[in-house]
Image (cartoon, rainbow, N blue to C red):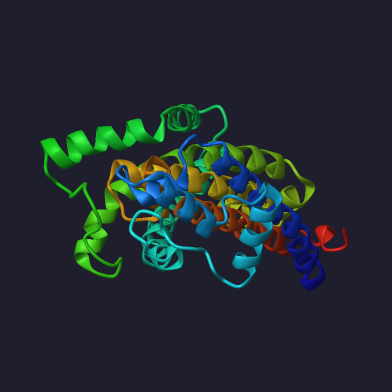
Amino acid sequence: MLRHALHRLVLAIPVMFGVLLIGFLLMQVVPTDPATVRAGPTATPDVIAAIRADLGLNEPLYVQFGLYVWRLLHGDLGSSIINNVSVAQELGTTIGPTLELMFASLFWSIPLGILFGTLAGYWRGSLIDRAIMALSVAGVSVPVFFLGLVLIWFVGFQWQWLPFTGRGGPLWTMDGILSIILPAVTLGGVFVGPVARMTRTAVLDVLSADHVRTARAKGLTEVLVVRRHALRNAMVPVVTLIGLQIGFLLGGAVVTETVFSWPGVGRLAVGAILSSDFPMAQGTIIVLSMGFIVVNLIVDVLYAALDPRVRGA
């Protein structure tokens, strides 16, 4: 398993390099000049030219990219051109709230999706199956921002049950728990449907397998048959889907944090892009990309743990 994990880690290196290159080039096609943004609207052309030289913007693109990668290898993400604050410092203060939001979203959505999918697969064709599949399709179809706005309007504004703006505190405090409920429900709501549908398909395939019929012939209860013999073997494709969906969940976190004014990396990325703060935008892209890569690496390791055939691949 260790060899499999190291192999996947090596394969992630060119992916990360491609992300850095694409993120760097995307910042170059933006019509705003970083030197003009830093100098301010009243700066003279001489001042702007001096800032461009100081930032290395007069160099060819390949030289700029090389210097950019060299700074990253030394842990230097640069400084914001808006407030001259270290990008690493800003990311350090925002990565915690984003991880809290991701954890809270997955904490309830993954077990609920697996439960719904198992029930739908076991009672295939019943009213329960149809109701769960209808809810799953609705959950996949509803945009994240729409669900968030609906919850804000009714639960937060009309009924005033829960706070809907900002972060009340750390997740281990009561204010933090109350403030994270609506963002976590919004972000996790789009996660339940895909997990339930994949779990249903996998459970249906496993329930017709020979080892499940053998377990029933031994006199085991249906709960033990489903939990030990059906659900465990059905987790291989479900874990793969969960890993892929967690990666896409990072994109949903950007929208959710913006809607609920959650002080995370996603909201920081949106603000940096809107204000043409290129170093900050590139830093957030790196963090989100590394999160996607780490999640996929963990999924590969779990996949190998669940399916021994993958270890020798």
Question: Farthest residue in the front direction?
Answer: 46
Left or right: 106 in relation to 56: left
Quadrant for the N terminus, please: bottom right
Q: Quadrant of residue 106?
A: bottom left
In this view, the residue in front, 272 or 67, is 67
The count of marks equals 0
The answer, for residue 229, to whether it is visible in the render is no
Q: Is residue 6 above or below residue 208?
A: below
Q: Quadrant of residue 313?
A: bottom right
In this view, the residue in front, 128 or 257, is 257
Left or right: 137 in relation to 224: left
Q: Quadrant of residue 293?
A: bottom right
User: In the image, residue 286 lies at what x, y percent?
Assistant: 56, 56
User: In the image, residue 169 lies at what x, y percent?
Assistant: 24, 65
In this view, the residue in front, 223 or 312, is 312
Residue at image position (30%, 41%) is: 259
In this view, the residue in front, 222 or 187, is 187
Residue at image position (39%, 36%) is: 144
The answer, for residue 59, to whether it is visible in the render is yes
